[in-house]
Amino acid sequence: MMRGFKQMLLGGAVLLAGLSPTAGAETIAIQGATLVNGSGVSTPDATIIIKDGIVTAAAPGAAVPAGATLVEGKGKVVTPGLFVSSSDIGIEEVSAVKETNDSNAANPRISVAYDPSYAVNPASSLIPLARAGGITRAVVMPAVAFGDGAHIHDGETAGHVDEPLFQGQPALIHLGAAPDIVVKPRLGVALPFGESAASSAGGSRALSVAILKAALEDVRHYAANKGAYNQGGTREYSLSRLDLEALLPVVRGEAPLFLAVHRAADIRVALRLAREEKLRLVLMGAEEGWMVAGEIAAAGVPVIIKPTTNLPGRFEIQHARLDNAALLEKAGVVVILTGSADGHYANQVRFQAGTAVAYGMPRDKALAAITGRPAALFGAGSAGQIAVGKPADLVMWGGDPLEPMVLAERVFVNGVEQSLKTRQRALEERYLKR
């Protein structure tokens, strides 16, 4: 059975080998489309000119160069490429096959320094699948940042910790066909909070906070005494040298701490911790964020949420509700929307935005929450916007991209038009029509 499974994977890889991007030394003019910029504002009847992969015009009435390939845009919508802001895409292929899963590294001596960008596979079959859903950028997030925290196993006693508190450093990738798709590694440090952190720390949320504060103090002491450390002249630290170095940018305020936190009370503790330790914070999950929305907004902390979470699957999300995104947005929080951490479902992030709109989030804000806002948060340069003089990073849709039956018709990543053929489509064409 395993041999047959491996043959199936190999066959899929062979099929994908022919799915190359469209080479782009031409001029394309999309005429009459509704243009949506990175803030979610729509401009009807726009003409978008792409010359040699660069956007040279994006406005109503823009002149079409002679010899341009004309694309009918009436009834179409053109948006920046979409972001999925927390995913294992590129580092996990089949969750049940551990050899294909680099998303969960559990080593108590190297945790903060876990950098998943070194494991990203640009040939992953999940990348074309996500791209067909209009995704052009993704944040590869270490596994426990999704809320799947480490737990004490049966037979172990409270206080025994066999997995690290920290979970590594997220990385930004693009989803174009290329040998190297890592855009920006080491965006910050991911850390579970609440129930997950309590389990890792020995059974108590308070212990997890104490361990975190001790680690931050160790980093500060290490930074001030590197010479002595290299000569064995400092006190013992709770983290390895690699982890101390990896956490330095967070302690210095140069990079954020991505905190997976869910319960309202834990969010308050996280905000307090950020004040006390002078940390830049990004909240992830925040299912009960609506209960403390004013406090989050006052702290200027952005949140990355999955708006379809509304069932109390754990005690710490008893008050999850479908209008969480709308209530956070109304309070003035910078809301970024994402979907399932499983890369197989990355292409559904626009459905998350559609659900947020259905439950009260303004449509332009929801579109911004999957384009321009994550681009700004993750320092993605010209991605997340359609700007003259910048490489085309955009999607042409058959209609409203928040409607499930609407499909992406053309996708450009870094100025190159991409094939929309997926492994699933290739298999269909190979076998279904026989």
Image (tube, helix red, strand yellow):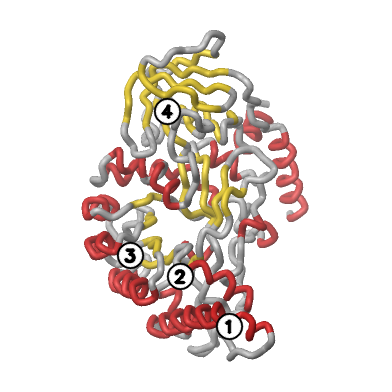
Indicate the position of residue 379 as horizontal and vertical percent values: 48, 50
In this view, the residue in front, 185 or 205, is 185
**Residue 59 percent coordinates (x, y):** 38, 22
Q: CA distance from mark 2 to mark 1?
A: 29 Å
Q: Secondary structure at mark 1?
A: loop
Q: Secondary structure at mark 2?
A: strand
Which callout, 1 or 4, points to the residue nearer the camera? 1
Task: Give how far apart the Cα atoms at labels 2 and 3 are.
Answer: 18 Å
Kindly check if marks 4 and 3 are in contact, taking CB atoms under 8 A apart as contact.
no
Between disc 1 and disc 3, whose residue precedes? Answer: 1
> Which residue is label 1 attached to?
225
- Determine whether the residue tagged by mark 4 lies in a helix, strand or loop: strand
* Residue 91 seen in the figure: yes
Q: Quadrant of residue 328?
A: bottom left
State the mark number for residue 312. Answer: 3
Mark 2 crowd level (few <14, some 14–19, many ≥20, 10 Å Cα): many
Q: Do the CB atoms of the residues marked 2 and 1 lie less than 8 Å apart?
A: no
Report crowding for label 3: few under 14, some 14 to 19, many 20 or more residues within 10 A (C-alpha): few
**Which of disc 3 and disc 2 is earlier in sequence?**
2
Q: Quadrant of residue 223?
A: bottom right
Q: Disc 4 residue type?
A: Val
Q: Estimate the spatial distance between the alpha carbons at disc 1 and disc 3, rounded to whole Å.
A: 46 Å
In three-dimensional space, the C-alpha distance between marks 4 and 3, rounded to whole angstroms, equals: 37 Å
